[in-house]
Image (tube, rainbow, N blue to C red):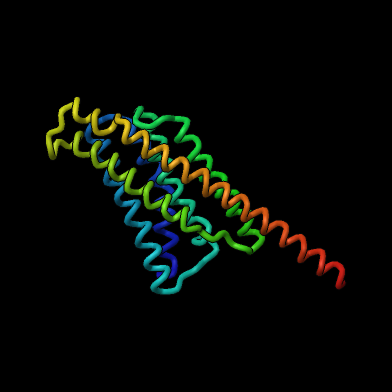
Amino acid sequence: MNYLPNILTIIRLILAPIFFILLISKETNLVIVSYFIYVFGAITDYLDGLIARKYNIITPFGSFFDPLADKFLTSFAFLAFANLGILNIWLVAIVVFRDIFTTIMRIYRFDSKSGLITSKTAKWKTFFQMIFIFYILTIIFIYYSEIIHISIANYHKLLYSIYIDLSMVFITILSIWTMLDYGVSTLVSIKSSKKKDNITSKKN
């Protein structure tokens, strides 16, 4: 049981690029499978957190790679949407860069043992991202699976619309804000660490 959360995290890391490749293939069966892969990945995210909290399983591996796996999954989703022409590539690039940036900050804070606390704004950003991604993926799934008939015209209206663009702009703004927030927080941490080192060296 102790290793289960980490196993689920590894599975999510592996599934992310597979999901991307299947989704951009535009092959009906592969696109349908990509939807279920993403849903399964999202479920593993919920489960590994639930198990870790319930059994108090906290490991250095899980603390670092669990949020990284989440970023992998969402970043590959945004990149796939950009590849399909649904999202503006420059907005996607900013969001992905933000995730790379925060990962670097997390590595630094992990090494310095100061930790990187997720802000409320970052949590809201993640919440909006998940709803946004699931909306787009569900429309794509319904269209390809034909569970509900959607004409090509309505399909384009639902995905290639001003509302999608505005939603992505909003997510991008939140991404920039949280990136700056984490950057400032890390700078404060660096200054604080240097002060402690100076005080320690003077005492010695």
| Residue 141 appears left or right of 72 | left
Give the camera-side residue of 104 and 117.
117
In the depicted view, which residue is nearer to us: 53 or 119?
A: 119
Residue beneath the point at 47% across and 46% down: 174
Image x and y of residue 41, in percent: 35, 51
**Quick check: 189 above or below 76?**
below
The spot of residue 26 in percent (x, y) is 28, 29
Q: Quadrant of the C terminus?
A: bottom right
From what the image shows, is residue 186 above or below residue 140?
below
Which residue is rendered at x = 31% and y = 35% of the image? Answer: 163
Q: Is residue 145 left or right of residue 197?
A: left
Above-or-below relation of 34 to 113: above
Q: Quadrant of the N terminus?
A: bottom left
Name the residue nearer the viewer: 59 or 190: 190
Across and down, in percent, residue 146 comes to 14, 36
- Rendered location of residue 110, percent (x, y): 61, 59
Give the residue drawn at x 27%, y 46%: 36
Q: Residue at x 30, y 45 (%)?
A: 134
Q: Quadrant of residue 160?
A: top left
